[in-house]
Amino acid sequence: MDGIHDMGGMQGFGRIPINQDTVFDHNWQKRAFALAETLAWSVPFDADQHRRAIEQIAPVDYLRRDYFEKWAIAVQTLLLDAGLVDEEELRSGRVKFPIPQDEHPPVPAETLVQATRAGAQMTCPETGSVPAFAVDQAVRVRPHGAAGHTRVPRYVRGHIGRVVSNLGFFQFADAMAVGKGPAPQFCYTVEFEARTLWGEDAQADDTMFLDLWEPYLESA
Amino acid sequence: MDGIHDMGGMQGFGRIPINQDTVFDHNWQKRAFALAETLAWSVPFDADQHRRAIEQIAPVDYLRRDYFEKWAIAVQTLLLDAGLVDEEELRSGRVKFPIPQDEHPPVPAETLVQATRAGAQMTCPETGSVPAFAVDQAVRVRPHGAAGHTRVPRYVRGHIGRVVSNLGFFQFADAMAVGKGPAPQFCYTVEFEARTLWGEDAQADDTMFLDLWEPYLESA
Amino acid sequence: MPHDDHDPLEQGAALRVRALEELMVAKGLVDPAALDAIVEYYERDVGPRNGAAVVAKAWTDPEYKGWLLRDGTAAIASLGFTGFQGEHMRVVENTPDVHNVIVCTLCSCYPWPVLGLPPTWYKSAAYRSRVVREPRVVLEEFGLTLPEETRVQVWDSTAEIRYLVLPQRPSDWQELSAEDLAERVTRNGMIGTAAV
Amino acid sequence: MPHDDHDPLEQGAALRVRALEELMVAKGLVDPAALDAIVEYYERDVGPRNGAAVVAKAWTDPEYKGWLLRDGTAAIASLGFTGFQGEHMRVVENTPDVHNVIVCTLCSCYPWPVLGLPPTWYKSAAYRSRVVREPRVVLEEFGLTLPEETRVQVWDSTAEIRYLVLPQRPSDWQELSAEDLAERVTRNGMIGTAAV
């Protein structure tokens, strides 16, 4: 999706707010963060589904609302999509209808912290899959983006880079985001010359690296 | 400038507000429009300078403010740039310092209406200039945009199209916008297949036409 | 976009413009009569009726139609429609095979002398972003379903040419007077977001 | 972004989140103890001190440094730093010739186990949009002027790898204890927006 979230290279956003140097400024931000982390288990949803829901926030709200409010809005969307709440409940905070609790057990504190500390499993067995590209090979990023959630920014579309490493066989964000995961794909680190992407304004030797799943690429 | 104004192909903006079918909804919108039309003479500024000033509005304001408020904001910017007002005057509406009136005469009503009805002169004598491209020639849009005001949208960058007509030798918007006009350039209508621009989601025979000045193009 | 009267954003805009007008008049940069005159000009002299007259003439006068499609600027000027944002006109013809639609993705370019100033939806982010990428879906939202075999041509007004769509002639055109024909022509028909 | 306490936008956000928390607890979808525990975990156990320990060790232990650059995930895990948003780590080394800086243009990907959650500026539209296009200008805003001959490498965290910058070792490193060295390491130094 060519959405407002795809910000790389956009101009007009002014100076970096370097002094906004904290993680949380308000207690509600902590609660919004924690709600996303816990509801990911009981609803459930994964990080790509949450990102996709954030990207679907109207552009003007994407720009003006607080980062953690957007996390909460995305969680609300995922709850609505799952049929676990309705709009009126979200407004009031009061329960109107019960949910099948057995199917959506809350995550206990200890389980959550242990799992958070352990991390997720994001790679899959290659089971005979063969990578399409080799290290040092020139690749071109496909010129057209996907309509849904995708992790290839517009600013590299159609441009030629060089594979610097094959990272392995990873769950594919485009599929995960719509609950069709893991549909694993090889993922590569690709290096681009800054001038390829930005023209002569960029400095000659500077480079950019992006991690790109195989379906985003073609031989150059 | 890869700014928020460059909207072609962006996703996430929802349904067309078809019922917002009027030109003006408030009297102040008419006044904002009229102020831009008259001040273009006395400040002076041209349409490209006004467009450039609109593009420089912060993205969140570009999205949330009324179209005619943005016209007024751009006029304020041009007045500030010309040194004819200061911020406090704009806030209060009250004059703090005089301006050299001889250099900035207000346009009389009759002159304005006559000139509006007559239109502007936007082409220049070709004086031996030779167009770089011919009708039916394949051209590629240069892959990198200009940092300043420019009239080549991102969605055609790097893509190949076909020249369908040479429109003539026109004042060049990129130069006009920074007061370096007319710096005329040939301008061409270029046709692109929809699938070239948008991939397989587009319908096979559909096409797009854009009018592009010569510096935006290279031979394909 | 229209705001309700208690919208603080709209109130702020109104205050901004009032202060600007007062300041400009006080500084001598603007003659208030010129403000009134230009608003009156666009409200009285300019609007889609001009374009409709062009279209109705093209529907009934094959020679004029040929001229209009060959040299839109001159043919339109011959009816007295000239001026800012219409100095260079191209008229694009809808047929059973081809449907044209116009947009300005970068701002709000629009053929003022023949259509007046653009309606709010034409300037909206939704229209500007979507009609180039999914014109058929956008036209459906306007209630216009095109046959798959009709080719869609989208014209993005990126330079100094302004576009006018010549809609398909109604089948009963011979029974109608020039005035009645012009009545049939809608603004959206001349943008390409409606059939006529 | 931080809001002042009378900002209606911030108040609306606070209300939204409070209603959501109440509803989720009442619906049985969330155990309030889990909310508290996860906030406490990120406030107490996770943060830039973890990354600083990794960096300080790499500065003083060449073998560890080699391992860290070869297999960041394992070398970092060996110090006990693992978890969400750090399952696959790559450490990139700053030298006099090369300066690395990390970003996530599409959202806010960041190596949580070693740096904690990202600061607001890292998630800002300005940083995300600009650092890939004009990294040197951005670094200047952070007060970091790079020699022209230093190559800048920008790493956009677009998939599941998370990045950590290994800053250049201070020249007086041999005079410092492991703790003092770790004190020198700043969060921005490990993002690449500051020298150490």
Image: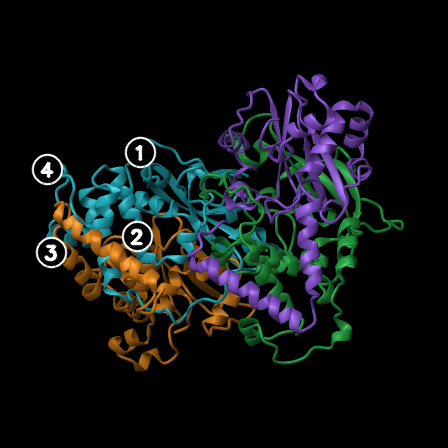
Chain colours: A green, B cyan, C orange, D purple
- Does label 2 or label 4 sit earlier along the sequence? 2
Which quadrant is home to the C terminus of chain D?
top right
Q: Is residue C7 left or right of residue D70?
A: left
Report how far apart the C-alphas of labels 1 and 3 lie in the structure.
32 Å
Residue C120 figure quarter: bottom left
Q: What element carries label 2?
A: helix
Q: What element carries label 3?
A: helix
Residue D8, above or below D148: below
Q: What's under tag 2, amino acid-wise?
A: Trp
- Does label 1 or label 2 sit earlier along the sequence? 2
Rate crowding at label 4 as few (under 14), some (14 to 19) or many (20 or more) other CA atoms within 10 Å.
few
Rate crowding at label 3 as few (under 14), some (14 to 19) or many (20 or more) other CA atoms within 10 Å.
few
Report how far apart the C-alphas of labels 2 and 3 lie in the structure.
20 Å
- Does label 1 or label 4 sit earlier along the sequence? 4
Q: Can marks 1 and 3 be said to lie on one chain?
A: no
- State the residue position of label 3: C33
Q: What element carries label 1?
A: loop
Report how far apart the C-alphas of labels 1 and 4 lie in the structure.
23 Å
Tell us which disc is closer to us: 1 or 2. Answer: 2
Which residue appears at 67% of the width and 42% of the height? D47
> Residue C2: x, y in percent?
34, 67
- State the residue position of label 1: B180
Q: What's under tag 3, amino acid-wise?
A: Ala
Which residue appears at 44% of the width and 67% of the height? C95
Q: In this view, does B168 lie to the left or right of B139?
A: left
- State the residue position of label 4: B102
Report how far apart the C-alphas of labels 3 and 4 lie in the structure.
19 Å
Q: What's under tag 4, amino acid-wise?
A: Asp
Chain under disc 3: C
